[in-house]
Amino acid sequence: MMRLLVTGFGPYPGVAHNPTALLARRIAAHPRLRRFSVEASAHVFEVSYATVARDLPRLLADLRPDAVLHLGLAPRERMIRIELRGENRRRMLHPDRSGAAPVRRRLEEAGPDLRSSRAPAEPLLRLFERARLPVRLSRDAGAYLCNATLYASLGATGTLRPPPPTVFIHLPRPHRLGRKGPPSRAVETRASDRMTEALVTAALLLVKDARRRSA
């Protein structure tokens, strides 16, 4: 049985409802994963630097996942973004949900400037394209909690042998996926369902890549 960790985020200033929390839970509970002998766990982070720094190493140590799929919200986007790297930086003027603002620009004083994902980016890109979902590769995960999570996760999983494929995917609000115009419940539901199915397939691709690495 292969182990998969899927994470999302809770609300944060300006976002009262974060759809990545629901999507992470839906993906982890999806029956397709069980049929392919994947044991999935979902975790929803509070949007807090201290919480991510405390919980992420514990999750990785306790679960020892074979693959890791992080989800984050890009509320102004209309496309899915597959993040290729995490940067050792954070925005000084953007407090987290606890109200704490960073006092240092670097996430890790002794850490490298960049950490790159070894996840199969091009196959993931083609997967979403086949699902007719707007998608692009991204080399800038921002300088907020999404970037901090990816940077820390790549650092922690990079010490494992073989390192589990670890990817961060930024998602638009479901009703904005590839479209303009006012939101509606029907549009949001259909888009959320489409994203769920595509992300489950992405999770299976990561697990397949993990199996290949460990063979």
Image (spheres, grey):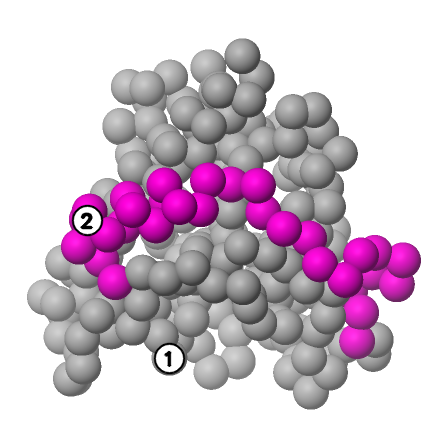
Instruction: List the residue tagged with mark 1.
Output: 76
Is 119 magenta? The answer is yes
Task: Residue 199: say if magenta.
Answer: no
Q: Residue at x 18, y 81 (%)?
A: 180
> In percent of the image, x 63 and y 73: which residue is there?
143
Q: Is residue 94 above or below residue 5?
A: below
Residues rendered magenta in the picture: 105-134
Residue at the limit of the structure toward the left, as seen here: 186
User: What's the CA distance linking mark 1 and mark 2?
Assistant: 22 Å
Between 20 and 195, which is closer to the camera in this rendering? 195
Q: Is 122 displayed left or right of 142 in the figure?
A: left
Q: Which residue is mark 2?
A: 131
Viewed as shown, does residue 15 lie left or right of 199? right
Q: Disc 1 residue type?
A: Arg
Picture layout, residue 87 above or below residue 62: below
The one of 164 and 23 positioned closer to us in this rendering: 164
Q: Nearer the viewer, mark 1 or mark 2?
A: 2
Q: Secondary structure at mark 2?
A: loop
| Residue found at x 65% / y 25% | 162
**Residue 30 at x, y = what percent?**
29, 34
